[in-house]
Amino acid sequence: MASDAGQGDVVDGGTFTLKLQGVRIGEERFVIRREQATSAGPVYRAMAELNLKLEGRTQRIGVALEVLGDDCRPRRYEAEINGAEATTIVGVVVRDRIRLEVRSPRGDEMKEFLLRGRSAVLERRIAHHYFFVWKLLAGNPSVDATVLTPRDRHHTPVRIEDLGEEPVRIDDRELVLRHIAIVAETGQSHHVWLDGDRVIRVLVPHDEFEAVRLFSADQSPTTQGGPDER
């Protein structure tokens, strides 16, 4: 990919286990870096690679996202989807619009969407993108925003709500995590649980999708409770 996430300080990185309908379909490995601030604020660059098995077919997806400023305004997005229907997507933001160029077996396609106010790229079944959606709250209990799903060519108004901290059990860990909800006008919702800025779990009920972070020894949540003695 043309985008390069190889520079800057790492603010997060790791691996998510991905599930559909409760069945493991693969992993997402990602890294998010923050570069030195410009006059418009810091630059974040995120990259991820997904290795999936869907309906007996192997699929590999590479994504790269660049955002600008403390409000994490999208600046560039790229995706390469390998498999039965190989697809490439490039999205570039110019002023208040993002232009998507898509190449797939169905042909070439170009679309433009207006990006005003709080906006985020939230690609379907990409867990680390919720890091930037969380940033849009900026300490507020709730905000209105728009999210762009490039693969589906959807541009959706949503309300992002901070539901506060709550106990969550992940594998054999009892954690206290912050819960945010992303609710569309249709009522469809995405639920995200975070430890600080780190996305720990994602649940999208209408898509029957779940992502859960794998913990290494040096990435244990700071909010971990005591062991469950049951």
Image (cartoon, grey):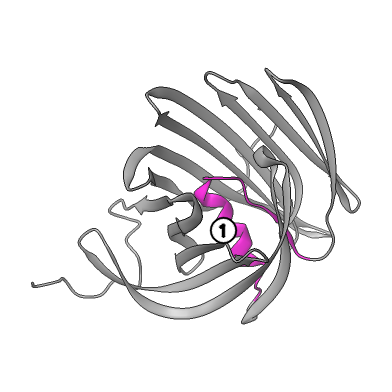
**Left-right relation of 45 to 98:** left
Q: Is residue 2 visible?
A: no
Residue 144 appears at what percent x and percent y?
Answer: 72, 71
> Who is closer to the viewer here, 75 or 4?
75
Q: Is 97 within the magenta?
A: no
> Who is closer to the viewer here, 198 or 148?
148
Residue stretch rendered in magenta on the structure: 118-138
> Who is closer to the viewer here, 49 or 87?
87
Q: Give the residue drawn at x 35%, y 70%.
A: 222
> Who is closer to the viewer here, 93 or 13?
93
Q: Which residue is mark 1?
A: 131
Task: Classify residue 117 by image quadrant.
Answer: bottom right
Where 72 falls versus 98 (above or below)?
below
Outermost residue toward the front?
A: 186
> Which quadrant is home to the C terminus?
bottom left
Outermost residue toward the left?
A: 230
Q: Give the residue drawn at x 53%, y 51%.
A: 128
Where 146 falls versus 122 (above or below)?
below
SS under mark 1: helix
Residue 116 appears at what percent x and percent y?
Answer: 85, 61
**Left-right relation of 126 to 113:** left
Q: Give the residue drawn at x 56%, y 57%.
A: 130
Say which amino acid is labelled 1: Phe
Residue 113 appears at what percent x and percent y?
Answer: 84, 48
Q: Give the residue drawn at x 50%, y 34%.
A: 49
Crowd rating for badge 1 (residues with CA inside 10 Å; few <14, some 14–19, many 20+): some
> Which quadrant is home to the N terminus?
top right
